[in-house]
Structures are given as structure tokens and as C-alpha cells.
Amino acid sequence: RKEVEQDPGPFNVPEGATVAFNCTYSNSASQSFFWYRQDCRKEPKLLMSVYSSGNEDGRFTAQLNRASQYISLLIRDSKLSDSATYLCVVRQRGSTLGRLYFGRGTQLTVWP
Amino acid sequence: NAGVTQTPKFRVLKTGQSMTLLCAQDMNHEYMYWYRQDPGMGLRLIHYSVGEGTTAKGEVPDGYNVSRLKKQNFLLGLESAAPSQTSVYFCASSYAEKLFFGSGTQLSVL
């Protein structure tokens, strides 16, 4: 079983829609959680960290559910520029600092 | 404002040839990584380094070697390229668990 699992999508939504992605992780000792964004043929870039209490950054909201071992990303009022692949990333407690596990990514397309 | 720089951006090799990918970062980060990304597989860690002079194996180290002689540089070598090593390679450095990636190298092995 992979360390981090994501629904690959694709998710196709109209502008202005709200869309949510989930990501599950297998190791209950996982400690740190992140969402990265990757545009087509580009490098991944950090979108946001995910904190235990949940956190928001503009139109983006991240949630962590340790009991069910999943994290989520909610995007409100989708923009065309949100079209990208979203990568769920996890670090396990006890692993080398910075040793991160990546999901395969969820592809989002926002259409006009 | 360079960040992480990878060279080359594209390369085509024949089976059995060797090459070295260079990664340089100007952020004074201790940790550096090499990943490969294949369709449907996501990013997989090849090797990483926690500081100058140190290296360690990641998930898929076979067929690759690395060196970190200087803090700012992390080299990835392919001694005898195989078609299975056709991929996009990303170098990254990290600070406080946050990764900063280079723009990638598209490698094709024929």
C-alpha cells in the first residue's frame, strides 16, 4: 500500500465552483502535511501547509483528520488559473527531517 | 533570485551511456534531494543529502549515484543509462520541511 493515496481525477469544474480533494495516508505516525501545486511541465511549488486545527489561505482551506488519516483541500470560487495538479505530501514522525512522501496528484481543470 | 538551478533541461541518451545532472542552490539549505517523476507514479525519491559530504538512498536508488562535495551542489550520475530511466528528474532543497524545486530535466534513454 502506498504511503499517500490520492484520487487522480481529473476534476473538471466551471469557474466559480467549489471543489474538494481528499488524500489518505497509511502511517498513523505521520507528522507533517502539505499541499503542493504543479502546473503542466513545471516543478511542484508549495501551496500550503496543513495544521491540526485546519487553516485557510484566501480561497483555499486545508483540513486534517488524524482519526481517519486523511487531509483535504477545498478551493472556493475556482479560477481558470487554479487548473493544475495538486500533490498531497506527508512526513512521518521519526523519518529524516525533510524526507517527504508524495501522492500521485489530483488533476484539476477549471473551465470558463 | 536563482533558488534551485538544474542543468541540463533536456537530454537524450543511448542505452549504456553515462551522464551527470547538476543541481545548484543558493539558499544555503542543508538538505537536498533528487526525485524522478513518471506518469501515474508521482514523485519518487532517488537519493538525498542532509549536508555536505553526506548522501543517503531514497525509494528508487538503483542505477544512480550522487555526490555532495559542496553544500550548494548535488550531482546525480547515471553510469549506464537504461530505457527505464527515461523520466523527468527534479532536484530540490528544503528548509523547515518545505521543498524548493528546480525546473526539472527531461531525460530520454533510447
Image: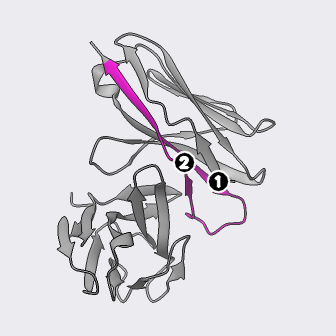
**Residue B83 drawn above or below residue A87:** below
Badge 2 element: loop
**Residue B56 drawn above or below residue A78:** below
Q: Nearer the viewer, mark 1 or mark 2?
A: 1
Q: CA distance from mark 1 to mark 2?
A: 8 Å
Please give left or right for residue B11 compared with residue A40 in the image.
Answer: left
Residue ID at (40%, 58%) = B37
Q: Nearer the viewer, residue B85 or B45?
A: B85
Are the residues at dot 1 and dot 2 in contact (C-beta closer than 8 Å)? yes
| Residue at the right extreme of this rendering | A67
Q: Nearer the viewer, residue A29 or B62?
A: B62
Badge 1 element: loop
Q: Earlier in the sequence, mark 1 or mark 2?
A: 1
Residue ID at (56%, 59%) = A100
Chain of the residue that carries numbered disc 2 in the rendered image: A
Chain of the residue that carries numbered disc 1 in the rendered image: A
Q: Amino acid type of disc 1?
A: Lys
Please give left or right for residue A27 compared with residue B87 in the image.
Answer: right
Query: Mark 2 sits on what residue?
Result: A103
Screen quadrant of the N terminus of chain B: bottom left
Observer able to see residue B5: no
Residue B10: quadrant of the picture? bottom left
Q: Can you tell which mark lies on residue A2?
A: 1
Give the residues drawn in magenta, as a range. Answer: A87-110
Q: Position of residue B18 (x, y in %)?
A: 26, 87
Q: Amino acid type of disc 2?
A: Gly
Q: Nearer the viewer, residue B69 or B8?
A: B8
* A60 falls in the magenta region: no
**Residue B50 drawn above or below residue A62:** below
Screen quadrant of the C terminus of chain B: bottom left
Please give left or right for residue A63 compared with residue A56 in the image.
Answer: right
Dot 1 crowding, Cα within 10 Å, few <14, some 14–19, many 20+: few
